[in-house]
Image (cartoon, helix red, strand yellow):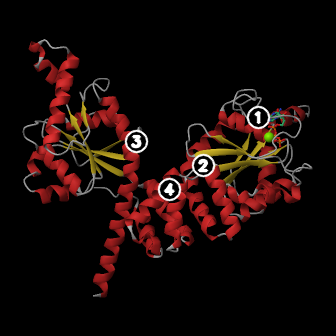
Amino acid sequence: MPQKVPEECITKITEALQSVKSMKTTREFMTVLEVFSQFKMDIAVTGESGSGKSTLINALLGLDHDDEGAASTGVVETTSEPAMYQYPNLPYVRLWDLPGMGTPSFASKTYVEAMNFVLYDMFIVVISERFRENNMLVIDEIQRQNKPFYIVRTKVDNDLLSQSRKLAFTETRALGLMRDECLKYLNDKNLHPSVFLVSVHGTQKYDLQKLKDTLENEASKLKIEVFPLFMANVFTKGRTKARTIQQHALQSGKISEEDLQKICTICKHSDFAHGTEALKTVLDALEHFQLDVAILGETGSGVSTLLDALSGKQNSTNSTTSATSLQYPDVRFWAVSGIERITDNLEDIKLFMDNFDFFVIIVSEWQQALHVELARAADQLRKHYHFVQTKVDCYLQTQGDLCYPEIQLLDGLRAQSAEELKKANLAHSQLFLINGLDKNTFDFVSLECVLSSDLNAIRLSAFAYWVDGMVRQKQNYSTCQIL
Ligand SMILES: Nc1nc2c(ncn2[C@@H]2O[C@H](COP(=O)(O)OP(=O)(O)OP(=O)(O)O)[C@@H](O)[C@H]2O)c(=O)[nH]1
Ligand SMILES: [Mg+2]
């Protein structure tokens, strides 16, 4: 079976975890991962007054300036306090429209302090017309806080229009010069952020779409980068600063009170908050972690057909290859047919099943109860599963002579299965009735929905157990060497 994460991650993670005392129990580790999965990444849109910050936010939200819920824009100083907007498509990303820099209300000198940059995880620095000293002040502060940022140069339509009167004008050349101007100052400081040239009067032209795509593609990586920093800031900054960050996070819904409590407790008893790099390494590995889902069934029970249906592929055949699907990123589905051949010994089944993180167990015959044994083995391994009864269309055909309406036959089947599961003490289990050859019938869509939401949560616990196993393995190995 291929590795669950790339080899280089394994080496890094075991080294990193040895240096962090707080990672010693899987439960603590799970808590941190759960908090991470709920954590909201806050991106502050900052820059000089009137540079087009609010207009850019509306463009990213896909709103017109007069739409309900849009940020206010205008030719006079408009945004007077930070306002939050949920980023579409990425539930864990929020944009913050900050007031502009360089007005009597927000003087350049005191701007970064007044805006409390420590509250945000990432920045979009908006520049219009020229790269100015104020822009550098903002970037220096972001640098000092070690946070990621993009540069967006707005109003390129205006710049192009004024340049177009020159004889040697070409749009490509003019845009190239604008980009070079931004990069010149930054590269001198050894900074290499992504630069986007945008205009609200030409959202299809220029780089607005590229900005959206980059943000959406990089968001999960950025979250891994910024979460350890948030943890470190919450617990290691001076008391007043830490309290401000915590209060802001709670008030804005960045983190729930319960989650904050949980990580406070963990951090009090350990040096976790100082393990920023270690935490980043672990989260990096989580990003690469492959969840292995086995579809278990007897020969001819429809294992491969179900694998094809779930992965959207065709003709997958055996357990030596896995199939992935766009719908479930980082999940590998395995077809494990002929399960009746290895179910004699519970310990053997468990050993085999321990290779996987989650199971879809096909029920062939309610009387044989093979699926019950598989479910028990999964329970003992503390892993999760769903039951699937395949070929429901065939069942309906065999009942054709009875002339009952289909719905009645299906209800009968469900009642019978519920009864059987109750008898086997598995009443908590979920059963889906499907026809693997037709995804539009019976419970297939519900199965897909439940898998999508379940697998995300299961990923975290599977990853935590996997890391725990890795660390134990490493510890046993070191003990053996000492002995
Ligand atoms: N031509 C052109 N005008 C723009 C563009 N982006 C913004 N503007 C205009 O610039 C003016 C200021 O835009 P805002 O989005 O309110 O600027 P802001 O940075 O949020 O301003 P403050 O909140 O006051 O700091 C508005 O009149 C916008 O219509 C653009 O890409 N092209
Ligand atoms: Mg504004």
Asked if disc 1 is less than 8 Å from ligand 1, the answer is yes
Res 35 label: 4
Type of amino acid under label 3: Ser
Type of amino acid under label 2: Gly
Q: Position of residue 65 (x, y in %)?
A: 75, 29
Q: Residue at x 54, y 68 (%)?
A: 277
Q: Mark 3 or mark 2, which has the lower sequence index? A: 2
Which residue was labeled with disc 1? 199
Disc 3 packing (10 Å; few <14; some 14–19; many ≥20): few
Q: Is residue 476 above or below residue 224?
A: below
Front position among marks 1 and 4: 4
Q: Is residue 157 above or below residue 471?
A: above
Q: Mark 3 or mark 1, which has the lower sequence index? A: 1
Q: Decide: marks 3, 1 in contact (CB < 8 A)?
A: no
Q: Position of residue 356 (x, y in %)?
A: 27, 53
Q: Is residue 239 above or below residue 348?
A: below
Res 253 label: 2
305 or 26: nearer the viewer: 26
Which residue was labeled with disc 3? 453
Q: Quadrant of the C terminus?
A: bottom left
CA gap between label 4 and label 2 equals 13 Å
Q: Position of residue 224 (x, y in %)?
A: 54, 57
Q: Residue at x 66, y 35 (%)?
A: 61
Q: Is residue 96 left or right of residue 257?
A: right
Asked if disc 2 is less than 8 Å from ligand 2, the answer is no
Q: Position of residue 292 (x, y in %)?
A: 31, 50
Front position among marks 2 and 1: 2
